[in-house]
Amino acid sequence: MVARLRAAGAALVGRTNMTEFAFSGVGINPHYGTPVNPAGTDGVARIPGGSSSGAAVSVALGLAVAALGSDTGGSIRIPAALCGITGFKPTTRRVPLTGAFPLSYTLDTACAMARTVSDCIAVDSVIADSAVIPRVTNPAATRLAIPRQVLLDDLDPVVARAFDRALGRLSAAGVQLEHVDLPELGELAGLNAQGGFSSAEAFAIHRHLLAARRDLYDPRVASRIDRGANISAADYIDLGRARLDWIARMEARLARFDAVVCPTVPMVAPEIAPLRTDDAQFFRVNALLLRNTSAFNFLDGCSISMPCHAPDELPVGLMLSHGPMRDADLLGTALALERIVQPSQRDD
């Protein structure tokens, strides 16, 4: 990816901080410090989101036009949403990961965070094996599915207001919104109850280093990796087969829509301080941050988060998602709807 960006003329200005081994949606790093979310205007040090924490902060501060991140369960879209920028997760197989240290061979992908959809597309066109040509749609011909299950549960009031306001703007622009049943979303917690692909594959990757140098690991990250030790080969094969069936059923339900729409994460960025010391609170927040985004990693789909909050609010992300290899369609839809959900946006 870096070689392709250099060859395309990109000016690479630095390396950014992140969650250890990309294994958390919170963005806290006990070894090298946690970048403070620059979008907070209340003087409170808030999390940037993770795992690509420093990448999102660098774009939000205007230090870079775009930043690379990985996305295994939401690590591009979560910090993008919490920092008030745009983040795109492509279909996994489109972007080569040569040189990247893996978290999950099954779920890992990478792309960009930027201020606009078009900037994300520009980066994607360079780093992906095959560039997509977005098919920009007429908002009045766009059909969005609003899931009844899981993804709208337990929303922070600020998130709920911003999301409802965005839906109102979309409806006023002629976008066809339909509340739909996606019962498959309710199956995800059970399917991944043992830790899923991330824990199984991370344990395979880290088991020898963990045995030799556990003292160097963030204990919270190590505890998530450890869950993979209890996933047998049979469990892993069963999960892979169940995933294929799950993807087929989800694709069938989504075939008549241009995207699924939901909040990227169900909360605004919480304070850093309590999460540094309270493990129970940390893991509760981490699970909520990953809940919506990780559904579309499991789908092997494509997904983009765009800001939809008012200028006086903490950042809120609106997420558009679709199935595998629907990247061109999704990006076209995002281009068409970006200014509707974020009317204050302007070209820089």
Image (cartoon, rainbow, N blue to C red):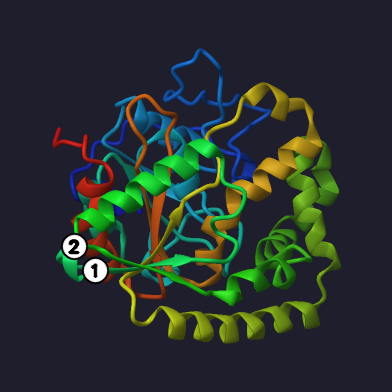
Label 1 crowd bin: few (<14), some (14–19), many (20+), radius 10 Å: some
Q: x, y percentage for residue 311?
A: 32, 27
Q: Residue furthest top?
A: 43
Q: CA distance from mark 2 to mark 1?
A: 5 Å
Q: Residue at 67% of width from left, 41% of height from top?
A: 285
Number of marks in picture? 2
Residue 295, image x and y in percent?
Answer: 55, 64
Q: Which residue is mark 1?
A: 142
Q: Quadrant of the C terminus?
A: top left
Q: Quadrant of residue 241?
A: bottom right
Amino acid found under the numbered disc labelled 1: Thr
- The residue that appears at 41% across and 47% down in the rendered structure is 163
Q: Is residue 78 left or right of residue 321?
A: right
User: Residue at image x 59%, y 44%?
Assistant: 25
Q: Secondary structure at mark 1?
A: loop
193 versus 13 height, above or below: below
Q: Are marks 2 and 1 in contact (CB under 8 Å)?
A: yes
Left/right placement of residue 26 relative to residue 69 reads right
Residue 139's disc number: 2
118 with respect to 80 (left or right): left
Q: Amino acid at mark 2?
A: Pro
User: Under tag 2, what secondary structure?
Assistant: helix
Left or right: 16 with respect to 294?
Answer: left
Q: Is residue 328 visible?
A: yes
